[in-house]
Image (tube, rainbow, N blue to C red):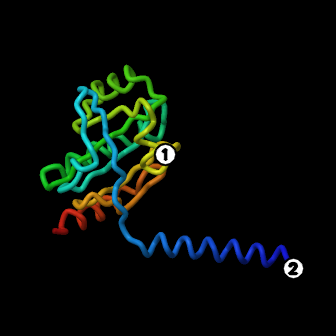
């Protein structure tokens, strides 16, 4: 009997947690400084005013490499409408590999290297790649994807967010 009560208590706690998470809506993107490949820096505040896809990835991640053409196509489709993409390479990714990948694939958006792991830590202790966040114009995270997003669904959400004031 105690086992059933414990299981029920855990289930209720999880349901309550999910309810709080779903009911709270968007949360502010964590304060972070992104170091770009050219050495310049971009902060979370710089994301405001645009709908931005923040994609944590690695050159050694098969899914990341496979989804990158779709990430590029999404960027190309919406960039003129107030959409941006920021690809954040994980701390374990050798910088030379990241630079080579960005150059050979002609990545059209900004690429950052999280060499200390502090950005991944700030964004919810990201360990799995790809992990992708969609941030609205107010700088709030509205969606988190672990693994490759459903790009048709992602596009609908981007269009909805771009239409917001």
Quarter in which the N terminus is drawn: bottom right
116 to 83, vertically: above or below: above
- C-alpha distance separating marks 2 and 1: 38 Å
Q: Which mark is residue 10?
A: none
Few, some or many residues within 10 Å of mark 2 (<14, 14–19, 20+): few
In the image, residue 92 lies at what x, y percent? 48, 29
Give the residue at the far right of this rendering: 1
Which tag, 2 or 1, sits closer to the chain's start? Answer: 2
Secondary element at tag 2: loop
Q: Does residue 75 appear to the left or right of 90 in the view shown?
A: left
* Quarter of the image where one finds residue 106: top left
Residue at position x 33%, y 40% in the image: 87
Q: Does residue 130 appear to the left or right of 36 in the view shown?
A: right
Residue at position x 20%, y 51% in the image: 77
Q: Which mark is residue 126?
A: 1
Give the residue at the far front of this rendering: 31
Q: Could one spot residue 153 in this view of the protein?
A: no
The residue pinned by badge 2 equals 1
Q: Nearer the viewer, residue 69 or 24?
A: 24
Q: Does residue 137 appear to the left or right of 116 in the view shown?
A: left
Q: Nearer the viewer, residue 9 or 135?
A: 9
* Quarter of the image where one finds residue 32: top left
């Amino acid at each position: 009997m105690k086992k059933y009560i414990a299981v029920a208590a855990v289930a209720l706690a999880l349901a309550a947690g999910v309810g709080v998470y779903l009911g709270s809506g968007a949360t502010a993107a964590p304060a972070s400084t992104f170091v770009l490949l050219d050495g310049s820096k971009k902060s979370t505040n710089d994301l405001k005013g645009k709908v931005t896809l923040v994609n944590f990835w690695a050159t050694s991640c098969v899914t990341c490499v496979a989804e990158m053409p779709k990430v590029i196509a999404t960027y190309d489709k919406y960039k003129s409408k107030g959409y941006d993409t920021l690809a954040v390479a994980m701390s374990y990714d050798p910088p030379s590999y990241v630079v080579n990948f960005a150059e050979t694939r002609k990545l059209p958006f900004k690429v950052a290297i999280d060499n200390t792991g502090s950005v991944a830590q700030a964004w919810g202790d990201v360990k799995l790649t790809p992990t992708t966040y969609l941030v609205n114009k107010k700088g709030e995270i509205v969606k988190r994807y672990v693994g490759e997003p459903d790009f048709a669904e992602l596009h609908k959400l981007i269009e909805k967010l771009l239409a917001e004031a």
